[in-house]
Image: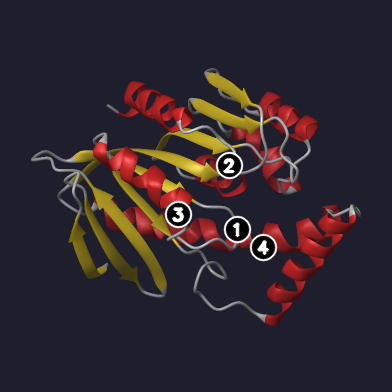
């Protein structure tokens, strides 16, 4: 892991950009003399690690006492995309805007993206846990499909917060039964891009004995800010 820049923010949080091989990432850490727990924060497919909503969540969590890390997965953010990926994204946007079935396009596009992203997240986690300022345990926050696969295959994930999306690849819908860590599931009731019933069915499928569903009115990007604060309390119970 090679740190390429660092900046101390007004709230005391240290933000550092890093590279790990071909993986670019950002790490936020609080002012603390002791090693702190870690939250891996993944944005939805295609959005950069510097997206404003993710950065705001990360800064708030770091100020609350967590190390927070995010990366640009293959084909996301500034990382190069293949012509096939670009075509799949265009086909998916067109089908959704036209109200056409998108399952086949989604499976062919998102499924491989998840399979590529999770090994990179695990490699990043290895490097992060080697840093003296990070002591674990580890939580996950963000993109549901990646989070399901990561929580199912990596026992270091202790708790997970997912932003509900009905369009989750078939493999991850089946894999949800293997996810047994405490779970906080955020659902936007009027999400124009994700079928509500699919999200509710996915919540029911998780194998966690402790799982909580928070549903709020509004569209895809309308998650209330107080959910970030509630999320911190959720992680406090399971990571501190």
Question: Residue farthest to the left?
Answer: 33
The residue that disc 2 covers is: 148
Q: Earlier in the sequence, mark 2 or mark 4?
A: 4
Q: Could you tell whether 127 is left or right of 133 in the image?
A: right
Q: Earlier in the sequence, mark 1 or mark 2?
A: 1
Q: Earlier in the sequence, mark 1 or mark 4?
A: 1
Residue at 39% across / 51% down in the picture?
Answer: 55
Residue 90: name its quadrant.
Answer: bottom right
Secondary structure of the residue carrying numbered label 3: helix
Secondary structure of the residue carrying numbered label 1: loop
Q: Which residue is more in the foreground, 181 or 185?
A: 185
Give the Cα distance between marks 3 and 1.
Answer: 15 Å
Say if 214 sits above or below 158 in the image. above
Give the Cα distance between marks 3 and 4.
Answer: 26 Å
Q: Which residue is more in the foreground, 117 or 77?
A: 77
Q: Could you tell whether 106 is left or right of 224 in the image?
A: right
The residue that disc 4 covers is: 112
Q: Earlier in the sequence, mark 3 or mark 1?
A: 1
The residue that disc 3 covers is: 52
Circle 3 or circle 1, nearest the eye: 3
Q: Are marks 3 and 1 in contact (CB under 8 Å)?
A: no
Residue 12: percent from the left, percent from the top?
A: 16, 46
């Amino acid at each position: 892991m090679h740190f390429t820049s660092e900046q101390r923010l007004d709230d005391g949080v240290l933000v550092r950009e890093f590279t790990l091989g071909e993986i670019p990432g950002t790490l936020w850490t609080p002012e603390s003399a002791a090693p702190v727990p870690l939250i891996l924060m993944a944005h939805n497919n295609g959005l950069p690690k510097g997206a404003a909503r993710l950065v705001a969540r990360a800064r708030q969590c770091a100020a609350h006492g967590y190390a927070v890390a995010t990366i640009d997965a293959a084909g996301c953010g500034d990382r190069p995309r293949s012509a096939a990926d670009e075509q799949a994204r265009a086909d998916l946007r067109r089908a959704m805007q036209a109200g056409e079935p998108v399952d086949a396009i989604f499976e062919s596009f998102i499924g491989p993206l998840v399979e590529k992203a999770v090994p990179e997240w695990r490699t990043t986690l290895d490097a992060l846990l080697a840093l003296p300022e990070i002591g674990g345990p580890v939580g996950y926050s963000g993109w549901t499909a990646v989070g399901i696969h990561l929580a199912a295959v990596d026992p270091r994930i202790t708790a997970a917060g997912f932003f509900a999306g009905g369009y989750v690849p078939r493999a991850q819908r089946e894999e949800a039964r293997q996810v047994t860590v405490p779970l906080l599931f955020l659902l936007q009731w009027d999400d124009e891009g994700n079928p509500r019933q699919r999200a509710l069915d996915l919540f029911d499928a998780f194998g966690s004995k402790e799982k909580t569903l928070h549903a709020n009115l509004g569209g895809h990007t309308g998650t209330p800010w107080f959910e970030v604060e509630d999320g911190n309390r959720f992680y406090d119970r399971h990571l501190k």
